[in-house]
Amino acid sequence: MLDNIKILIHQGKQYIPDITKVEVPGIFKGRPEISAEKVDIVALIDLCPTNAITADPVRLDIGKCTFCGECALSFPGKIKFTKDYKLATNQRSSLIISEGENTNINVDPDQIRKEISKYFSGSLKLRQISAGGDNSNELELNACGNVNFDMGRFGIEFVASPRHADGIVITGPISENMAEALQICYEAIPQPKIIILAGTDAISSGIFSESRALNRNFINQHTIDLFVPGNPVHPLTFINGVLELIRKR
Amino acid sequence: MTISIKNNQTIPIQSIPVLKYEDFLSVNLSLLQDASSHCVNYYGLFEAGIIKLICCIANDSDHTVLISSSEIIGGENIYPSFTAQHFSFHIFERELHENFGIRYNDHPWLKPVRYPYDHANQESLISNYPFYQIHSEELHEVGVGPIHAGIIEPGHFRFICSGEQIIHLEIQLGYQHRGIEQLFIHKKKLLQRISLAESIAGDSVAGHTTAFINLWESLCNYHPSEELQFSRTLAMELERIAIHTGDLSGICTDIAYQLGSAVFGRLRTPIINFFQSWCGNRLAKGLLRVVKNNYYFNEKLGLELENILDSFESDYIEMWNKFHELPSILARLEKTGVLTTEAAASIGVVGMIAKASGIKRDIRNSHPHDYYTQLKHEPVIKHHGDVYSRTQIRNEEIRQSISYIRNMIQTIPIRNNAEESIGPLQKNSFTLSLAEGWRGEICHCAVTDDNGELIHYKIKDPSMHNWLGLALAVRNNEISDFPICNKSFNLSYCGHDL
């Protein structure tokens, strides 16, 4: 008993008191900013492994970006990744960052379905589905519930059964072999329900684009309530995004 | 009859002996008579109507890999299998059968592996897997998955039980198939290929990326500087500490030991946060690159890491000491999920699972690359093959990795500021790269054509060998012990399904 108390004391306070304001340690590849500097645009576009960069004006789509950071290393005056981890939005177009546009990425309150804050603001239970995910986003979604990030304090939790869930969180580019299971799981969730895409693979298939082993019909056929970019998503990005989505308004 | 190469050695494809299938079979099987040999990869390439089979047998005592090949037509021809004489080939021949339709007359378990999009028999569907069945009124079946209770990748487990006792488990995979090997050929940019390597298994980023980089640099006849070797080895050992610690948390969760679950779980955080300090990504994506080093490991990072390890170690040891003295914990872990040495050897398991069942098989020791040539790694071996052995391996490997890292950061290699360039890939060549990820032996193989273009890429994750080990280990256990057995193996779904 005394040993247990000793261990507990030695851990100190592990939780992050204010999840919305904490600063991430070290380098972080968060919301990018693109300056008006003149650079070799062809070389910049050619560098990107997922064709996330386009010209006129220069734009970076963080729904396609794998956050490899090579563009910022090769063109440091042009592209810079800030430490802003609030990247989640309900509008796919908000993930496309344009040259000279240094504004925050937001969840657009006008586009949130009314029932979401009505039913889910105090409690949200989610069913996670990995559909070709490489286990990196899965590790980070698990980390959301650990003692550091402690997402459970906001009433947001992952549950085992779709019958107990209010929505799904999809990771991975959606393999053909998981397409049916994903559909069945989604249908098993009672109405109203939400869909969250976690990670670049889920949002755009990322580095797996052009693979013949994918089936993204589910994404094309449903309205997505939240896009959470990252490779993998950072727990702070995920938790802040979900909190914004379900906040009482 | 074979050509002997070292880890990460490039050879002309023509130098690989092409044997008649009968000789190919007998030569490779006779190599396995030596207990220090095992098959690290066996696969096929399809070219102009011919299937070229390439078999790679590693000899752990003399640090070589013996390569041989055979060319067959496939089609209606029926071939004798390797598997009938050595079961460790079962998964490779199942893959050959699935990909190319090669027919065998004596393969005992010729089942689908992963249902790749281009598999030979398009009538074989993932929804219609041919499960083994026992018809008896006393037995019942339990099906679990593909979607599991936690946040975990998909796979289907089909148990045949007598009451609560597992008689048989069959594991059906393939749900995670993303066609990654084909994408390595389809996507031409090096940065695309390295991003793919980082996504083979997101929990083994350092392991798979190191295997890819070493292979690529060898194909380009480039020898990495000490600085590059240092950062790759350091990343692999940090990844080992992080995932092993997370696994200990998972094992505690599965036996409802809340304190261990919380403490080991939070101890993983400073390690992966260190990756973020180093390269901006908690799982080391973006850290390792071919030829260059975007994130030099400087003195300041060395100091930071030393402090992190100091505070990690004292809390870790305190928690471990409590954990392993509790009888209620040992009662759940000891003699649970036993994989005997005989079974482990016969199916050719690798990595942690082999070491927990008394088999010394560790690339860091047998086929060292990068800094492992200096570290003189001696693998941790346990003999009971149970959940507790696999737990102890993790504990001791964590401590071993910490001491390696402490030694390494005493002398950080100086930064190489010269702009390095890399030549083209060598033409008509074959390269094999082995690396010991935290899960075990990773093997990448590549072949180039006469224009120096990559024409074939083959990835073998340690999980390929080890999934069957889990199925055997749970036999005669209570079905309620399945989660703890599964966690103790912690195999990759996407690494298997690619």
Image (cartoon, coloured by chain):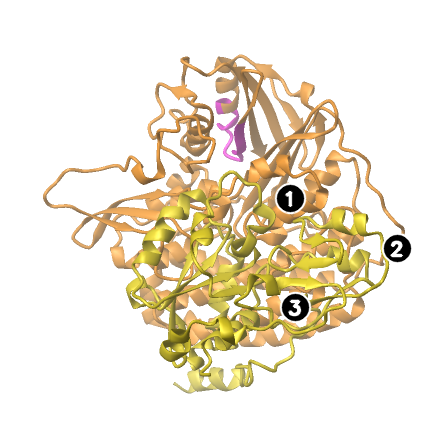
Residue positioned 71% across, 73% down in the render:
B304
The residue singled out by tag 3 in the image is B274
Q: Which chain carries label 3?
A: B
Q: Circle 3 sits in a helix, a strand or a loop, which is it?
A: helix
Identify the chain of the residue marked 2, using the numbered disc in the image: B
Q: How far apart are marks 1 and 3 (CA)?
A: 22 Å
Amino acid type at circle 2 is Asn
Find chain B in the image and tell me its colour. orange
Quadrant occupied by the N terminus of chain B = top right
Q: Label 1, on which residue?
A: B211
Relative placement, left or right, of B36 versus B258 is right
Q: Position of residue B262 (x, y in %)?
A: 45, 75
- Circle 3: residue type: Phe
Would you place residue B38 above or below residue A240 in this image? Answer: above
- In the rendered image of the structure, the colour used to display chain A is yellow
Q: Mark 2 highlights which residue? A: B417
